[in-house]
Amino acid sequence: MLGASGFIGVPLLVRLKQEGYFVTGVVRDPNAVARLPLDRCIRLDLRTATSPENWFDALSGVDAVINCAGVLQDGARDSTSAVHVTAPAALYEACERLGIFRVIHFSALNADQDAVSEFSESKGQIERILGASKLDWVILRPSVVVGRNAYGGSALFRGLASLPISLRLPQAGRVSLVQLDDVTETVIRLLRPNSGGHIAIDLAGPRPLAFDEIVARYRAWLGWQPARLLPVSSMAMRVGSKLGDLAGYMGWRPPMRSTGMKEMSRGAEGEPAAWNRVTAIAPRSLERTLAADPASVQERWFARLYFLRPLAIVVFALFWVMTGVISLTIGWDIGLSYMQESGAAQLSEPSVLAGALADIAVGLAILYRPTTRLGLIGAVTITLFYLVAGTIVLPRLWADPLGPMIKIWPILCLNFMLLAILEER
């Protein structure tokens, strides 16, 4: 299974194990291995798995392949063409060579229609490649998938529901939400013998909903009163998507990016009739699903932190960067006076320079997602160093009415809180 540590992959893996399957999972993140009930784990980055030979070891002893790996948009950690086209094409060629014919491939609703983004174009391209193969394939095209686990659009709905106002996005098309449990059950049924092949199935909920209707239902589920609607202009949407793109270049994966805006504008409406006919599954509505599983306090925490988390990371990173910049510019003489007072003498200038550069390095590391954890750990280390060193060489700072030493403690608390909520899924 590709994408075994993902939003769809994890609950699907649990269902496969409940059914008694031996599962080999392909994952990129080594930290995900410990929390997944995999029988065998292959660490492989799809960006480099571009030839059939890369897949022979992973396919050893395998009878069927499930591909639920996907990315929304290119970024520092992702490549749409590699994850959606190049790597799967190599995998499917390897399957043909090894005589592994059963393949269940996750695509996206509307991937067989005119593409509006690189995401839908790449999904359609691999569908055509798989359709031309000799494999016994099944293509699943889910609409926006939501579930108890929160990631991507599922998380965005909850975050928007937590805002004191309800944002109306006039440019957003309607969405036939599909429940994650229904998706995983579909795969289980299609893995059974004589379940049929060479079919493409749209996975869509029973009724399309407007974007603000979905947010309102999540808000009610979370136990909050309806909020006043505020229309969002096209200009604001474009600015938001550009900021999301910038975050993507920094290694983050916000759902509100250019690709997300394009796909959101088209919407994701579908009919569940064919899905029901092939699998006998009657997809559940959002209302029914939410009513059957009331929100917990943890859900409300997550919703409220959804936008506060990135805001806190940006503010904290800028705090460190600006501290360094100020030390190198308008605060240079003040920094030198502190160092000279402490007895640093000739080391005063090198010390101020080193401290300023370290602060800037920590701030930039926090902003860049692959190094965020290291940046936060570095921030803790430097903060504690400042605390100890300041106490030893300039103890009078504890009596300063502006509280430079006292303020270290809330900074440390914020640092530890960001480390605690850094994981994305």
Image: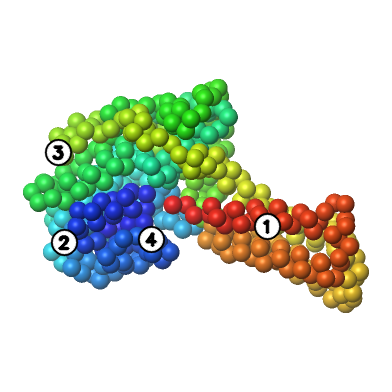
Element type at marker 3? helix
Front disc: 1 or 3: 1
Amino acid type of the residue that numbered disc 4 sits on in the rendered structure: Arg
Q: Answer whether labels 2 and 3 touch (C-beta < 8 Å).
A: no
Residue 412's label in the rendered image is: 1
Q: CA distance from mark 2 to mark 4?
A: 24 Å
Task: Looking at the picture, tell me which residue is in the foreground, 296 or 252.
Answer: 296
- Tag 3: amino acid: Val
Q: In this figure, which residue is indicated by the disc labeled 3?
A: 278
| Helix, strand or loop at mark 1 | helix
Q: Quadrant of residue 66?
A: bottom left
**Nearer to me, 396 or 99:** 396
In this picture, is 401 found above or below 172? Answer: below
The residue wearing badge 4 is 35
* Disc 4/disc 3 C-alpha distance (Å): 33 Å
Nearer-N-terminus badge (2/3): 2
Specify whether residue 162 is in view: yes
Residue 403 lies, with reference to residue 257, above or below; the image says below
Residue 303 in picture, x, y percent from top left:
51, 39
Q: Are marks 1 and 2 in contact (CB under 8 Å)?
A: no
